[in-house]
Image: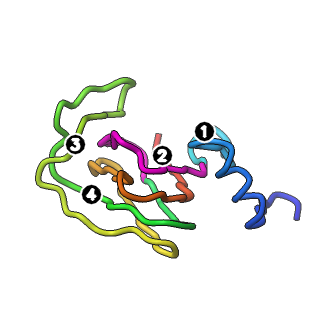
């Protein structure tokens, strides 16, 4: 499979057991990448906004609340084009569960709240920069 990446379910489970985030892929020129993310009853969810990155979440196991839209409370910018904060005011809530896919366009505030459950998801990022 030249030019393709393939991860078995067993490999993804092993990576999920190793830590909160694992880089699976980084495209040429750094314009796209994929990470495996594990949040296990995370006591402090973080709101974020990426000015130029679209996120695509594919949920592999568990569930969490996805909040999108609204305004980031206590917003700060740790790096150019990236915003973080403590919560989202006026956001829409949806439950994310295994098998769900969510697309979060660039410029959309979002937060994954996994305070009551564990969630494992693949996030694929694409930037227009």
Q: Position of residue 20 (x, y in %)?
A: 56, 43
At 60% from the left and 52% from the top, the residue drawn is 36
Which label belongs to residue 67? 4
Label 3 sits on a secondary structure element that is: strand
Of badges 1 and 4, the one in the foreground is 4
Residue 46 vs 92, above or below: the answer is: above
Q: Which residues are magenta?
A: 34-54
Q: Position of residue 127 (x, y in %)?
A: 48, 46
Question: Where is mark 3, residue-wise?
Answer: 87
User: Compared with residue 103, is residue 15 higher up or lower down, i.e. above or below?
Assistant: above
In the picture, measured across the screen, residue 114 lies left or right of residue 36, that is left
Residue occupied by mark 1? 30
Label 3 or label 4, whichever comes before in sequence order? 4
Disc 1/disc 4 C-alpha distance (Å): 27 Å
C-alpha span from label 3 to label 2: 24 Å
Q: Which residue is mark 2?
A: 127
How packed mark 1 is, by other alpha carbons closer than 10 Å (few <14, some 14-19, many 20 or more), is few
Crowding around mark 2 (Cα neighbors within 10 Å: few <14, some 14 to 19, many 20+) is some
Task: Indicate left or right for 115 with 18 as reference.
Answer: left
Q: Residue at x 29, y 47 (%)?
A: 107
How far apart are labels 1 and 3 at the CA level? 28 Å
């Amino acid at each position: 499979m030249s030019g393709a990446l393939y991860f078995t379910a067993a490999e993804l489970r092993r990576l999920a057991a190793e830590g909160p985030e694992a880089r699976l892929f980084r495209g040429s020129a750094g314009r796209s990448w994929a990470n495996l993310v594990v949040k296990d009853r995370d006591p402090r969810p973080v709101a974020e906004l990426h000015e130029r990155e679209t996120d695509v979440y594919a949920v592999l196991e568990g569930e969490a609340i996805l909040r999108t839209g609204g305004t980031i409370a206590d917003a700060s910018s740790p790096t150019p084009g990236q915003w973080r904060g403590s919560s989202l005011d006026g956001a829409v809530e949806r439950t994310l569960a295994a098998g769900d896919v969510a697309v979060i366009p660039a410029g959309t505030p979002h937060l994954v709240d996994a305070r009551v459950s564990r969630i494992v998801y693949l996030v694929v990022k694409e930037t227009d920069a």
